[in-house]
Amino acid sequence: MGKTMEWMNAYTEFAQPSPEDISNFIANPLWEELNRFIQENYEVKPQYVYSGCAAQTGWNVKYKKSSKALCTLYPMNGYFIALVVVGQKEQPEAEIIMPTCTDYVRNLFENTPMMGKMGMWLMINVTDDNILEDVENLIQIKRKIKK
């Protein structure tokens, strides 16, 4: 049985993984980097939530600041997915930074439809430092860092 199948069988909606379990499953230092970035810059704690959503079933980590979602992180074997929703209000600023983003994120942005008031749901596979930087920049569009 592969690592992903073991994970899915071990952590059902009734058995929540610990932060260490999630980190060990992902086994990628980018996970710790993004979590540290969000927690230090936005002073928020992660919320561990089980989702039955067909698009990405399983445990995820949500970050919210003042009831506004910053992002949702989905653990995967060796990487993670960062869901960043770009709303209509944020779209013009996101378009401005797109030329500085990786080809992968720029292509995702260009090919993800705006779903009215629900915004543009970018499901970003975080697999390298450059993509991580793109995710951090998109989060900062949603909520500026106050230093």
Image (tube, helix red, strand yellow):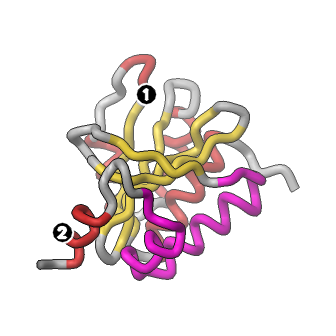
**Residue toward you, 99 or 87:** 87
**Residue toward you, 143 or 46:** 46
Q: Residues within 10 Å of mark 1 (few under 14, many from 20)?
A: some
Does residue 28 belong to the magenta stretch?
A: yes
Q: Main secondary structure of the magenta part?
A: helix
The kind of secondary structure element at disc 2 is helix
**How many dots with numbers?**
2
> In the rendered view, would you say 27 is above or below 88?
below
Upstream in the sequence, badge 1 or badge 2? Answer: 2
Which region shows up in magenta? 16-45
Classify residue 112 as left or right of residue 36: left
Whether residue 97 is visible here, answered yes or no, is no
> In the rendered view, would you say 91 is above or below 83?
above
Classify residue 6 as left or right of residue 88: left
Q: What is the three-letter code of the residue carrying label 1? A: Gly
Residue drawn at the location 22% of the way across and 63% of the way down: 9
Pointer 1 residue: 119
Q: What is the three-letter code of the residue carrying label 2? A: Met
Pointer 2 residue: 5
The kind of secondary structure element at disc 1 is loop
Residue 11, x across and y down, in percent: 33, 61
Residue drawn at the location 35% of the way across and 42% of the way down: 51
Classify residue 42 as left or right of residue 10: right
Q: Quadrant of the N terminus?
A: bottom left
Where residue 131 sits, quadrant-wise, is bottom left
Residue 10, x across and y down, in percent: 29, 66
Q: State how far apart marks 1 and 2 are (Cα).
A: 32 Å
Does residue 20 belong to the magenta stretch?
A: yes
> In the rendered view, would you say 122 is above or below 124?
above
Q: Residues within 10 Å of mark 2 (few under 14, many from 20)?
A: few
Residue 108, x across and y down, in percent: 31, 50
**Residue toward you, 110 or 64:** 64
